Amino acid sequence: MKIGIIGAGQIGGNLTRRLTGLGHQVSVANSRGPETLGDLAAETGATPVAVTDAARDADVVIVAIPTKNVPDLPDGVLEAAAPGAAIVDTGNYYPQRDGRIADIEEGMPESEWVSRELGRPVIKAFNNMYAHNLIDAARAEDDPERIALPIAGDDASAKSQVMAMVEELGFDAVDAGSLADSWRQQSGTPSSGPELKADDLRTALSEARPQRPADMRG
């Protein structure tokens, strides 16, 4: 599968490592230019590209950048993706870093805001975990210690594709509902951070409350 990753920080970098290790063709971009990604490319075999080329012909495009930077992506950055490509938002809104985003503060789920800014439907995934768990916590399907990750979104085909990728990475994929439900896996909710097995994750999602914690408000 051809995968484009926009963002080479902790989540983007570790997804690059894992997905190339599984044999996928990965292109990776960051805000500083492909010439700064030589070490990651040498380590993984991924192809460093400009942000404008990251989505080219990709079956999956993973956006792994700070929320505040989403509006700064080049216009049409996703237009060259393969037809029906799944667009994945891994981000979390942190007002201490991102500044105050009024629509999110007023209750819009973070990934609905990202989807609006990108002009494309997105699937929310990988946002509730610590980046090191992409490498350290992956387990075989029959391992009793295998943990689960929530995936939310409206496009059934794209969601199925992302859930299959999560399973391949070594985690149980839990359908967390529509993008409007994706607030249940935002930072500050019971599912954000703990290493939970599938049934416990479903319980955590059901116990989430829409009010943002005080330390998550701008």
Image: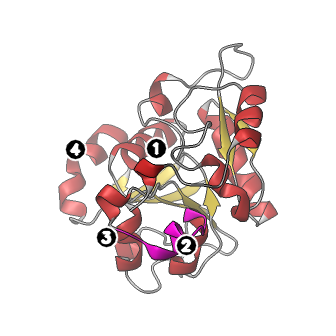
* Tag 1 near tag 3, CB within 8 Å: no
Confirm or deny contact between disc 3 and disc 4 (CB under 8 A). no
From what the image shows, is residue 11 above or below residue 84?
Answer: above
Say which label, 2 or 3, has the lower sequence index: 3
Return the disc, 1 or 3, that comes first in the chain's sequence: 1
Q: Are marks 4 and 2 in contact (CB under 8 Å)?
A: no
Which numbered disc flags the more N-terminal residue, 2 or 1? Answer: 1
| Mark 4: few/some/many CA within 10 Å (<14, 14-19, 20+) | few
Q: Quadrant of residue 5?
A: bottom left
Q: Are marks 2 and 3 in contact (CB under 8 Å)?
A: no
Magenta run includes residue 107: yes
Sequence-wise, the earlier of marks 3 and 4 is 4
Which x, y percent locates residue 14? Answer: 41, 40
Give the residue at x 41% y 30%. 132
Amino acid type, mark 4: Asp
Could you tell me if residue 217 is visible in this image? yes
Q: Is mark 1 in CB contact (under 8 Å) with mark 4? A: no
The numbered disc on residue 50 is 3
Rendered view: 97 above or below 121: above
Amino acid at circle 1: Leu
